[in-house]
Amino acid sequence: MTQVTATASQPSIEQVEEMVIRALRLEEVGITRIDPNDTLFGSGLGLDSIDALELALAVSKEYGVTISSDDPNVQQIFASLENLATYIQTRRREA
């Protein structure tokens, strides 16, 4: 995925990070920072399919971007914080 620079109408990677931490209540388990390139699911941050649903809902509410489970790129979108932020930025730019 191509990295997109945040603008006034685009969320920065830090803003997306804050949204992920808030939406999944990760601060309750001591997670206050996420490396942009760390794997979010499985052996990385350890998120699961329920977290993916909650995250997709939070992205929709916060940024008006829908992530469908039918999207053939859904695993790539959720692969890392950087990928998620880039996807949100790209979709908002296209809107």
Image: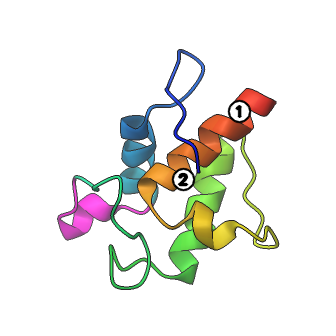
Outermost residue, top side: 8
Q: Secondary structure at mark 1?
A: helix
Magenta span includes 41: no
Q: Is residue 37 above or below residue 85?
A: below
> In the drawing, does residue 61 fall left or right of residue 44?
right
Work out whether 62 lies above or below 11: below
Q: Nearer the viewer, residue 4 or 28?
A: 4
Query: Residue 7 appears at what percent x and percent y?
Result: 53, 18
Q: Which residue is mark 2?
A: 84
Q: Judging from the image, what secondary structure is the residue with disc 2 in?
A: helix
Residue found at x 56% / y 79%: 50
Q: Give the mark count.
A: 2
Q: Position of residue 47 (x, y in %)?
A: 42, 77
- How would you rate the neighbour count of disc 1 (Cα within 10 Å): few for under 14, some for 14-19, many for 20 or more? some
Q: Which amino acid does the dot numbered 1 rest on? A: Arg
Residue that appears at 57% across and 43% down: 2
Q: Is residue 33 left or right of residue 7?
A: left
Q: Position of residue 90 (x, y in %)?
A: 67, 37
Residue, far front: 2
Q: Judge by depth and name the residue closer to the eye, 94 or 64.
A: 94
- Alpha-carbon span between mark 2 and mark 1: 12 Å
Quarter that holds the C terminus: top right
Residue that badge 1 annotates: 92
Q: Amino acid at mark 2?
A: Leu
Q: Is residue 27 above or below residue 91?
A: below
Q: Are marks 2 and 1 in contact (CB under 8 Å)?
A: no
Establish if 86 lies above or below 4: below
> What residue range appears in magenta?
24-32
| Residue positioned 49% across, 82% down in the render | 48
